Image: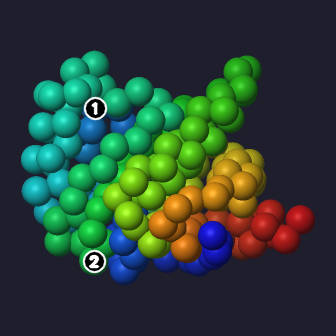
Amino acid sequence: MEIELIEGDITAQSVDAIVNAANSSLLGGGGVDGAIHRKGGPDILAETRKLRAAKYGRGLPVGQAVATTAGRLPAHWVVHTVGPVFSATEDRSELLRACYINSLRVADELGAASVAFPLISAGIYRWPVEDAVRQALTVLRAATPATLRTATLVLYGAETAAIARAVATT
Ligand code: ADP
């Protein structure tokens, strides 16, 4: 699988699947989650509500991933995953890697050839950007998916993109 790093807005990506850094409620939130629901329209929320009612009464557990269609977005699917909140006292990096592993699996099961990720947990959930990139690349570089050919890490803002590029070359 080819890995690309780009600076941009994930809601504008013309890929088969984009990943949403959702929260457990699956009912929308701030950051990238808010942007996806705002631009994708109400169909996405209608589907996550149904998923919540049918399968995840107590919310989607941290590290897991589920797919919906993508409403008005250029992508075909949104894979919703819940990142861990950063902790300075507890190593939660396995859960962060699980987000990437499970999102890749879900995208692959959908038959997607391309998937785009935001930097999960690196916003409201306060994960340090450098390590968030490192965790993402660890999983993406080790992945051996069946249908996925390209994974894009979409970095929001020039500063985040510069940090990511530096991490990727070390
Ligand atoms: P979390 O709650 O998992 O931390 P956030 O959405 O707050 O999720 O942030 C995750 C990352 O996504 C951050 O690096 C943030 O800057 C970035 N981000 C926010 N909006 C967008 C967007 N439209 N496209 C891509 N990345 C975004």
- What amino acid is at disc 1? Ser
Is disc 1 placed on a helix, strand or loop?
loop
Residue 78 sits in quarter: bottom left
Residue under the image location 59 percent in, 32 percent down: 95
At which x and y percent is residue 57?
22, 21
Left or right of 106 on screen, residue 72: left
Left or right of 50 on screen, residue 63: right
Q: Is residue 14 above or below residue 90?
A: below
At which x and y percent is residue 106?
41, 50
Residue under the image location 50 percent in, 54 percent down: 104
Q: Nearer the viewer, residue 163 or 63?
A: 63
Left or right of 49 on screen, residue 67: right
| Number of the label disc, if any, that sits on residue 126 | none
Badge 2 density bin: few <14, some 14–19, many ≥20, Cα 10 Å? some
Cα separation between marks 2 and 1:
24 Å
Asked whether residue 154 is in view, the answer is no
Is disc 2 placed on a helix, strand or loop?
loop
At which x and y percent is residue 147?
48, 66
Whether the residues at callouts 2 and 1 have beta carbons within 8 Å, the answer is no
Can you identify the residue that label 1 sits on?
Answer: 25
- What amino acid is at disc 2? Pro
Identify the mark nearer the N-term, 2 or 1.
1
Q: Is residue 111 above or below residue 131?
A: below
Residue 65 sits in quarter: top left
Badge 1 density bin: few <14, some 14–19, many ≥20, Cα 10 Å? some
Q: Nearer the viewer, residue 93 or 77?
A: 77
Can you identify the residue that label 2 sits on?
Answer: 74
At which x and y percent is residue 38?
21, 62
Q: Is mark 1 within 8 Å of ligand 1?
A: no
Asked whether residue 145 is in view, the answer is yes
